[in-house]
Amino acid sequence: MAKAPPAKKSVGGGMMGFFIIMLIVMGIYSIQPIRDVVAQAADVILSPFFSIFGNEPYSWVIVILVLSALTGLYSSLLQKYTIDYEKMQVQQQKMKDFQKMFREAQLSGDEKRVRKLNEKREKLMQDQMAMSQEQFKPMGWIMLITVPIWIWLFWTISGFPVEELPTITFPYWGELALSDPTALFLPAWIIWYMICSLCLSQVIRKGLNIGGL
């Protein structure tokens, strides 16, 4: 028996974008000449910013928190003004209505109605694909700003001795320095950035009325 296509939730600048950016950053970071040029260029702006918070080890925790808030803000603003969220909500509602009608037709055994609904499936799937592609429109601009920040964090934090870095206590993993690897094979500072970014982005997106993940 045919199944109705699932309704997709808006991912915005959510996990998909986060991991795309992370993969790009790690790829660039593996090429030393490119890494150094990007990091040194970003250092011109970010080093004075870091000095605002002093040179204490705990400053890194605050810096990452502030940078994650800033990246969450500009990425949300870019998404708000480049993605038609009203159209997206209409499309999501159409998909929900279609799923409801499709289930009712299946449960009632109305094969004629099921066939008619199946004829609408292709158009709905095309519209849904177009909306999914639209969500990636601002990704280039987001990466243009976010990638240098991440490269700079990689480059700078890796240059500090572990004993000069602050520690953060995570559930299950315990207390880790920012450069320590986690069970996810990522340094602790990336996990801290991820937590800050996802939490603060939800607040920002709610304030801008563009929904959550």
Image: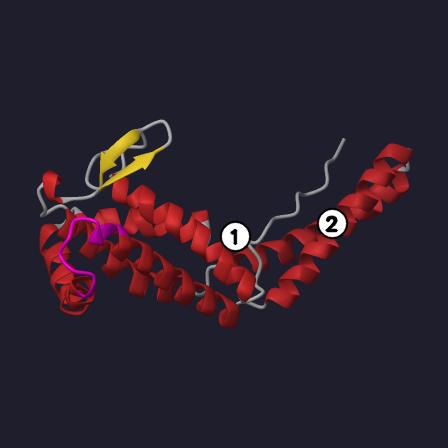
User: Sequence-wise, which precedes: disc 2 or disc 1?
Assistant: 1
Would you place residue 102 above or below residue 204 in this image? above
**Do the residues under discs 2 and 1 have CB atoms within 8 angstroms?**
no
Secondary element at image label 2: helix
As drawn, the label of residue 11 is 1
Residue 170 visible: yes
Residue 182 visible: no
Determine if the magenta segment contains residue 49. Answer: no
Q: Which residue is mark 2?
A: 96
| Local crowd size for mark 1, using a 10 Å CA cut-off: few (<14), some (14–19), many (≥20) | some
| Local crowd size for mark 2, using a 10 Å CA cut-off: few (<14), some (14–19), many (≥20) | some
In the image, the segment drawn in magenta is 52-61
In x, y percent, where is residue 103?
Answer: 81, 39
Mark 1: which amino acid?
Val
- Chief secondary structure of the magenta portion: loop
In x, y percent, where is residue 113?
Answer: 88, 44
**Residue drawn at (64%, 58%), measured in percent from left and top?**
127
Asked if residue 2 lies left or right of residue 148, the reply is right
Relative depth, front residue between 206 and 145 = 206
Would you place residue 172 above or below residue 59 in this image? above
Secondary element at image label 1: loop
